[in-house]
């Protein structure tokens, strides 16, 4: 019995969420918007990390490519599981951090 191949990762909605997270705001975004975007980014990041790990598993361990992918995956996991500070500004900063990490990982997965 073979393991089914996962459906390809659709980067379009991921990039749309990243744009929402990283857009310039004349004033800080509302807490509800920050929470919603952060939750979406976390979901996207979890799916992208799984896909990146699946791809990295096919690379020979110890090679330069494997080391780069492993470092990128560890960075994404660190951002994903880091506990945020309390407060509106801290939450918006966390959203921006997750947005940048999602953008970087999406770019790398797209170039693969």
Image: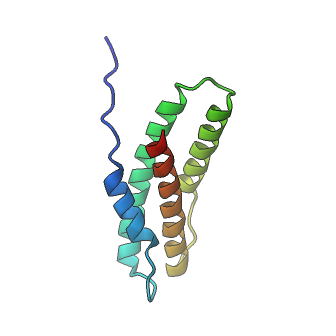
Q: Residue at x 33, y 26 (%)?
A: 5
Q: Is residue 30 above or below residue 69?
A: below
Q: Is residue 104 above or below residue 63?
A: below
Residue 29 placement: quadrant = bottom left
**Colour scheme of this structure image?**
rainbow
- In percent of width and height, residue 27 lies at 45, 88
Left or right of 35 on screen, residue 52: right
Q: Is residue 31 above or below residue 105?
A: below
Q: Return the residue nearer the eye: 13 or 34.
A: 13
In the rendered image, the quadrant that contains the N terminus is top left
Q: Position of residue 75 (x, y in %)?
A: 61, 50
Question: Could you say which is closer to the camera, residue 55 or residue 97?
Answer: 55
Q: Viewer-proximal residue, 23 or 83? A: 23
Q: Position of residue 72 (x, y in %)?
A: 59, 45
Position of 2 relative to 6 (above/below) = above
**What residue is at 45 percent from the left and 39 percent from the top?**
50
Please state the horizontal and vertical placement of residue 18, each as a whole percent of the image: 42, 63
Q: Which residue is situated farthest in the bottom direction here?
A: 26
Q: Nearer the viewer, residue 87 or 61?
A: 61
């Amino acid at each position: 019995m073979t393991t089914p191949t996962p459906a390809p990762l659709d980067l379009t909605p991921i990039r749309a969420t990243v744009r929402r997270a990283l857009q310039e705001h004349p004033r800080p975004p509302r807490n509800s918007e920050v929470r919603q975007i952060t939750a979406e980014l976390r979901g996207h990041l979890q799916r992208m990390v799984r896909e990146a790990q699946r791809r990295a598993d096919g690379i020979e361990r110890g090679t330069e490519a494997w080391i780069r992918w492993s470092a990128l995956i560890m960075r994404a996991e660190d951002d994903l599981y880091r506990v945020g500070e309390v407060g509106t500004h801290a939450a918006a900063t966390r959203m921006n951090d997750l947005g940048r990490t999602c953008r970087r990982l999406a770019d790398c997965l797209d170039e693969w």
